[in-house]
Amino acid sequence: MPGGDRPGDGIPERIHPGNGRRWTGLLETEVANAASNALNPILAPIKSLLGGAAAAPAAAITLVMGASGYPIPIQDYIQGIPPLFIDPFFPGGVNLGVNTPEGLYPLTGIKDLTFDVSAARGLTILDNAITAAFGQLNATSVNVFGYSQSAVIASMEMKALDPTNTPSSIPLNFTLVGNPSNPNGGLLARFPGLALPSLGLDVFGIATPDNSFKTNIFTIEYDGFGDFPQYPLNVVSDVNAFLGIIELHGHYPFLSGQELTPAPNGTAVELTNTVGPTLTHYYMIPTENLPILSPLRAIPVIGHPLADLLQPDMRVIVNLGYGSTTNGWSPDPPNIATGFGVIPPVPAGQIVSALAAGAQQGIADFARDVAAIRPSDFTALIPAVDTAGLNQVLAGAQHSLSSPQNFVQSLLNANLRVAYTASAVAASAYATALPTTDMLNAVVTAIPAYNIDLFGNGILQALNGDPVNGLINAFGKPVAADVGLAVLLGGFEVRVFEHAASDIVTELKAL
């Protein structure tokens, strides 16, 4: 069960404030020094408060990192996160932002900053920040907050500091949200042994240690990065999880204290079915509405009733992807690294019963929603006519035709605007080529090799005395992996084109 104190409170020699050394073994010394120098703007305000004198021992320092696409946390974020996620659980103190690269090709930035490269650089920066907190700032304890990619960075740091996964004497506490390395549910932990080199993703299989440091992990139900289906043959569950990445993954900073507090005082669910000794608490944040039904809910007036009609049964189907009919998370121990499976162990009778109850609930919810519809809801759909744009066009045309000089000047201006816009539109369009090619590369090289490996392992399992499960895994796991990865890669490809289309529309509007 989670809990228990670590033996001792000493700091190991390699990051002890008295030894004056930096740990730089994971990346080149130059990169580590650059990361250390990047900390100076973070530490400067604290040093100024000390008047240049030796730092007095600080009760605690909290290091706050951003998420993929959010490398530089702003002060509102740095000061707003600890009261929600840190202070109710660990001793608080000075809150400091830590800038990490947070690249996630192809969704953020160029290929120079793939996830692997970004996480490795972030690991060095975090390690230097921890060293500085204990050394230059004389902290007696350090809290680390990791979100999404930075939760993976924190997990890597935990493993580096304590490879044995036994209670460490380092006074470090970790809080991770939207964690792709969540042992049972994190996207990176769901596909052990997979690597996608063309996309810079070789970190599959990384699971957050559960017994090294006091740790809290918060996961929103159906957030596909931290709560990916255990049985990806369920394509409905996969699509729901991907849409959860888009809709739910960015919501952690906006959760309320009640949502983060377990019952009876809050709505969070603490997963207590851990196995063996662990210092980690796992919390699930229930999600009211399925992300997969959000497009239907967006339809005015009738969309919400229709979504409520479908949701109870749809939730049963989605939850089957997690091996349950009631919850959108795995019922297996949360602290055990759990890869994907083939067939959820849910009795058929339980499924039928859940669907029958869901149908009744859906009909009742639909009737309630329809009864609440008012005639004014339909009249509100009629859009107001906006003539401002037309008036602006007419005014511009009148000015251009007011004299020969204005007419010629307007043609010259239009020539430049059209040429520059065409260039920008073309650049946005062909920028999709490299990500698309890299995804196709993964589809025809890395994923088939992964399938062969899964098939071979299943055959070995059958030959080693488990023929039924071995053959199920040999033939089922490659298909299950392909279904889950197809949804993910297909979804990411859509996002790439969506971003390009958004840029193109922005350029055309500026004409």
Image (cartoon, helix red, strand yellow):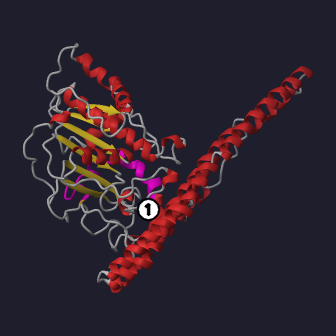
Label 1 packing within 10 angstroms: few (<14), some (14-19), many (20+): many
Residue 346 lies, with reference to residue 199, above or below; the image says below
Position in image of residue 66 (x %, y %): 38, 40
Q: Is residue 444 shown left or right of residue 267?
A: right
In the image, 284 versus 434, the foreground residue is 434
Instruction: Let me know if residue 266 is in the magenta part.
Output: yes
The residue depicted at 24 percent of the width and 56 percent of the height is 282
In the image, 493 versus 312, the foreground residue is 493
Q: Quadrant of the N terminus?
A: bottom left
Instruction: Let me know if residue 107 is in the magenta part.
Output: no
The residue depicted at 63 percent of the width and 46 percent of the height is 500
Q: Which quadrant of the figure has residue 17?
A: top left
Position in image of residue 111 (x %, y %): 53, 44
Q: Is residue 342 shown left or right of residue 176?
A: right
In the image, 500 versus 483, the foreground residue is 483
Residue 250 lies, with reference to residue 122, above or below; the image says below
Q: Which quadrant of the figure has residue 431?
A: top right
Q: Which quadrant of the figure has residue 445?
A: bottom right
Residue 331 lies, with reference to residue 48, above or below; the image says below
Position in image of residue 278 (x %, y %): 16, 56
User: What amino acid is found at the position of numbered circle 1 in the picture?
Assistant: Ala
The residue depicted at 37 percent of the width and 68 percent of the height is 340
**Mark 1 element type:** helix
Which residues are the magenta region? Answer: 244-269
Position in image of residue 284 (x %, y %): 29, 58
Q: Quadrant of the C terminus?
A: top right
The outermost residue toward the left is 8
Query: Mark 1 highlights which residue?
Result: 241
Total label count?
Answer: 1
Q: Is residue 281 shown left or right of residue 369?
A: left
